[in-house]
Image (cartoon, rainbow, N blue to C red):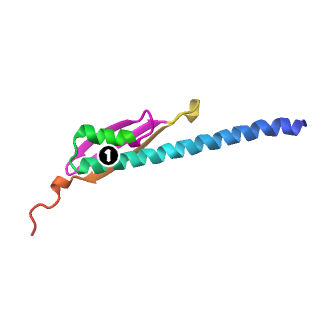
């Protein structure tokens, strides 16, 4: 084995591991977005709060925290999930979605 190979192989391994971590983090971010949207849709349909939270948690990455709130006519769902990784690579991913409450739609018309 040459000296160049002894240097290049660990660099390539580190690069591949970084790519895998980035891929897993991107997949978890997409799952956070999907979970927030699913929860907001369920809340807009006036489903019970426990059902809304369960819907969002089922779609979210493992260990995610889900928050539900209503501001006026809008339901808001926020999902936060930690990423796996050592030190600086341990990030907290988040996504938020809002949906108009269906019980406010179709009020008195002109």
Spot the residue most to the top.
87
Return the x and y of residue 66 as percentages of the image width and height.
35, 38
On-image quarter of the N terminus: top right
Q: Which quadrant of the figure contains the C terminus?
A: bottom left
Q: Which residues are magenta?
A: 59-82
- What residue is rendered at 29% in x and 51% in y? 41
Q: Residue at x 37, y 38 (%)?
A: 57
Please name the residue that numbered disc 1 is placed on.
Answer: 39
In-image side of 89 versus 62 (left or right): right
Q: Is residue 104 left or right of residue 57?
A: left
Residue 72 against residue 90 in the figure, above or below: below
Residue beneath the point at 68% across and 42% down: 16
5 relative position to 102: left or right: right
Q: Is residue 51 magenta?
A: no
Residue at 20% over, 54% down: 102
Question: Against 87, is 108 above or below?
Answer: below
């Amino acid at each position: 084995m040459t000296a160049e190979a002894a240097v290049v192989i660990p660099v390539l391994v580190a690069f591949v591991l970084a790519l895998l971590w980035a891929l897993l983090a991107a997949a978890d971010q997409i799952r956070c977005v999907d979970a927030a949207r699913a929860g907001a849709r369920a809340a807009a349909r006036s489903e019970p709060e426990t059902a809304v939270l369960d819907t969002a948690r089922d779609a979210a990455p493992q260990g995610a925290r889900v928050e539900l709130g209503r501001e006026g006519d809008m339901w808001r769902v926020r999902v936060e999930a930690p990423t796996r990784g050592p030190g600086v690579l341990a990030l907290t991913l988040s996504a938020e979605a809002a949906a108009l409450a269906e019980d406010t739609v179709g009020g008195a018309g002109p």
